[in-house]
Each structure stands twice: as C-alpha cells, then as structure tokens.
Image: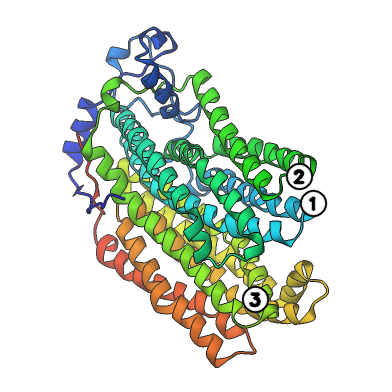
Amino acid sequence: MAQAGETRHTATDVSDTNSAANNAIPEATISDTNTAISTAASSTSNITNATNSNSIQPASAHPATTDARSTTGNLKGNLTRGSLIPTMLRFSIPYLITCFLQSCYELADLLIVGRFNGADSVSAVSTGSQMTHLVTVTIVGLTTGITVTISHAIGARRMGKVQRQIGQSIRLFAFVAIIATIALTASADPLLHLLSTPPEAFSQAHDYVTICFFGTPFIVAYNVISAIFRGFGDSRHPMYFVALAGLLNVGLDLAFIGGAHMQAAGAALATVISQAFSVVAALIYLKFANTGVRVRKADLAYDWAGTRQILTIGTPIALQELCIQVSFIVITAIANGRGLEISAAVGIVEKIISFLFLVPSAMLSTVSVVAGQNAGARQHSRSKTALRYGITMCIAYGALVCVASQIWGADIVRVFSPDDEAVVRYGAQYLSSYSFDCILAGVHFCFSGFFSAYGKSLYTFAHNIASVLLVRIPGAYAASLLWPDNLFPMGCASPLGSLLSILICSVLYYLRFSKRHPAVIADEQ
C-alpha cells in the first residue's frame, strides 16, 4: 500500500475563498446525458454520483452564472447550518442502523449454518468471517479519506473539487480492488493456517474465504459509494442498500445452505451476491437520481495531489483498524489458552461489546463528517462544538451501558449460555470491567473523528497503536498470568488502554487545536 505523507495545511481564508470561486464548476442537468463520454467513463460516473438525491439543487437555467457559494446553500446534506444536536442525530442514527444491519447479516450466516450443519461448518464460517471482517474494516478505514476530502470540498462549496476527488477515488480504489483480490485469494490457505483453523473445518473454511475474497471488488465498490454519500452528509441511502442486501442474504442463506446443502460455501456465495446487489442498487439509484454532479473525463485523469489527500487521511486509519482487529485475535488466543469456559465467556462478551460499540462508532463517523464540512466552511468553532457534543453523548450512553452491565451482567451472558454457570460467572466478571470501556472508548472515538476531519489521521493511528501495544495486549496477558481464575482484571485492559488514548488525544488537542483556529487541509488544484 502506498505510504502517505502529512497533508499540507493552510489557514488563509481569503485565498481559499478566491480559489473556491475560481474552481467552481457549473452543475450538470439531466439534458447533459447527450454529452456522456466513453462507456467506461460513463459507468464510472454512476459511482461518482453517490450523493443524496436531495443534496444538491438542480442547475439553474443559466449554469454559466452559477456561484461557488450558492451551489450548496440549500443542501439537505449541508451540516454547516442549523442546530448541531439534531443535525448530528439525523446523520448518526441511519449510520448506526446501517452498522447494526451489517452485524446482523454477518450473524445470520453463522446462525443458519448452525441450524442446518454441524460444528465443522460453524467453525469454518466463524473463522472465515474473522478474516473477511478484517478486510472490510481495513477498506472502510481507507475510504475515510474519500469522506473527509469530499466533506471539506462541500463545506467550502467547491463542486469542481468534489468531482475531481470522486474521479480520483474511482481510479485509486479500482486499483486497490484488483490488488486486494489477487493478494487475498493467493494467501487464503496461509492465513487459515495462521489462525490455527481446525483440520475438520479447513476445507470448508478454504471454500468460504476463497469465495468471499473473489467478492472483494464488491466490498470495495460499496464502501467507496457509501464514503461518497457520507461526505455529502447523507447516511440514509447506505442504510437502505444494506437493509435490502441483508434481506436478500437471509433468503439466499436458506436457499443455498438449507435447500442446496452447500454448507459454508453457500453462506459465502450468499454474502457475495448480496454485496453485489447492494452495489447494483446504489448504481441504479444514482443513474436515475437528479444529483446535479457528474464526473468529466478530466476528473478521471491521474491527479497525485487528490490521491495523496485520500491516502494521507485513509492509510493511517486503515492500518489502525488492521492492528486493532489483530489485537482482538491475540486477546482471543490468550483466552483460548485458559480453558474452554473462559474461552467461551470471552467470546460471548466480545460479541456483546461489538454490538454496544456500534454507538461510539457511529458518533466517530458523525463527528468526522460534521467537523469536515465545517472545517471546509472555516467554521472551526462549530467543529469543536460538534466534538464536545459527540463526547457528551458517548459518555451518557456509556454510563447507561456500564450501570446495566454491573446490575444485569450475569443475566446478559446467560442468554448466550443458559446451561453453563461457569461460563456465566466468568462472562459476568469480564463484562463488568470491560463495560467501562463503553464510556472511555466513546471519548477517544470522537477525538479520532475530529482529528481525521482536519487531516490528522496520524494522530488517530498513534494513540490507538500506543493503546494496543502498551496496554491492551500486555495488560490482558499479564492479567491471565496473575489472576488465572478471575476475568475481571483481564477485562480492565481495554478501558485502561482507552484511558491512555484519551490522555494522548487530550494533549494533542491542547497543543494543536485549543489555542488557535486549526488549519484546514490545503485544497489542491
């Protein structure tokens, strides 16, 4: 993967305003379809129109007179105006539902396979889904660069810049999809051996990951489209596409696994077809929606400045997500070495926490997009206010989760393991301490979103890697040695790691943002 350097910054309001006016591109109308470029460019332009159908007003009768500042003045996806809390909730709730639906249809594969097949198929899907999830979150992290750079351009009302960034996103991620597909399919077996896949499940696990890896282009395409939607302040349409794909996935699971008896391969095939369907649904919407944005041939030409901006923001986040997921696998391996009951308890709690963390994750994306648009509009005080509101909402949510975990922790774990009191006891211990991370993680998640909005993704990468390498993994390992019969100390490793992240984030924010208006990513010509 390309190594990205630090993005250049500027704080010159006047020059940026002039640049915005000079680079404004008149919007296209429906009648412009006569001027469509070649078939390849035409198909890629569908991807680039990934915006809310109501986000951009149709071009005026005299597009030549379109003003750079009037282009986004009435955007429904405009996050630079209005009361902040309702604005943030309108963005975060659809995004939260999208994440929830994605988690549910990943879980559906496992449940339906377990209903119609034995433990070998369940183990194959469980192991394979760990690998595919690792790939997905890494791609999502990389596409953050698209969301942030587009949100900056939208905030600055520079539609020409938006179109160029969309064009560069298509070029870059087409290359990423090709390379990732080749590399992943070639390394499927070594990765399965690295995860110590049980011999009884190896053949099915190989089928599962191979089929899923061949579907990598659909994962990349969907996440690029979703990133563009979010950059325009639209989190609703990705939710619709995922909901449709989830329903299709369940139906195909039943047909392939229950009807055709395809075992783990059927689950993988259902997943790939559903992902392809979500991409096609998005493209159909874009084809008929009057978005007012299209990509010209010049926008598809290679532009290192635009590509560098995407990579500079996205690469640290992608590496961060990769390392965090690897750390979860390491902690699971530590728990697996402590006996069956402890392994089961840790696995159950990790699943519970993954659902509980959907809210802080949604707020991270919300703060990133809201702060990104306001950074582009030079409304830095509003960006900082969005950060404060995001932290406040995450702390309130985390406190409720933490209290509930202390009171009903055993009952929550018992839902997943009703007949094994040892698992329930260990799980309650682990959840009791781990739940404090729901408060602390939400704080540094919001900081991460804010830093990313200002092109400081390396800050996000630094504090997360420090947390993982200095506290989470060594803390979990030390607790397993010092307290072999109690999971409460092991559960403390995660909130302590988040506490370190908060301290690092607070120092970085104070040094870089609190004393002065933060500089905005330079708008490359």
Report which quarter residue 75 is drawn in: top left
| Mark 3 Cα-neighbour bin, 10 Å: few <14, some 14–19, many ≥20 | some
Read off the residue under disc 1.
Answer: 116
Residue contact between numbered discs 2 and 1, judged by CB atoms under 8 Å: yes
Which numbered disc, 3 or 2, marks the residue that appears first in the sequence? 2
The picture places residue 128, in percent across and down from the top left corner, at: 58, 55
Q: What amino acid type should be assigned to the residue bearing mark 3?
A: Ser
Q: Dot 2, crowdedness within 10 Å: few (<14), some or many (≥20)? A: some
For image coordinates 24% across by 58% down, the residue present is: 516
Instruction: Check contact, mark 3 vs mark 2: CB within 8 A.
Output: no
- Tag 2's secondary structure? loop
Residue type at the position of mark 1: Phe
**Residue bearing the label numbered 2:** 261
**Label 3 to label 1: alpha-carbon separation:** 25 Å
How far from the left and from the top, in percent, is residue 265? Answer: 65, 46
Few, some or many residues within 10 Å of mark 1 (<14, 14–19, 20+): some
Give residue 150's quadrant in the image: top left
Foreground mark, 3 or 2, reads 2
**Disc 2 to disc 1, C-alpha distance:** 8 Å
- The quadrant of the image that shows the C terminus is top left
First in residue order: circle 2 vs circle 1 = 1
Q: Earlier in the sequence, mark 3 or mark 1?
A: 1
Residue under label 3, please give it.
Answer: 343
Q: CA distance from mark 3 to mark 2?
A: 30 Å
Q: Looking at numbered disc 2 in the image, what kind of residue is underneath it?
A: His
Q: Nearer the viewer, residue 385 or 288?
A: 288
The x, y position of residue 422, in whole percent, is: 75, 82
Element type where label 1 sits in the image: helix
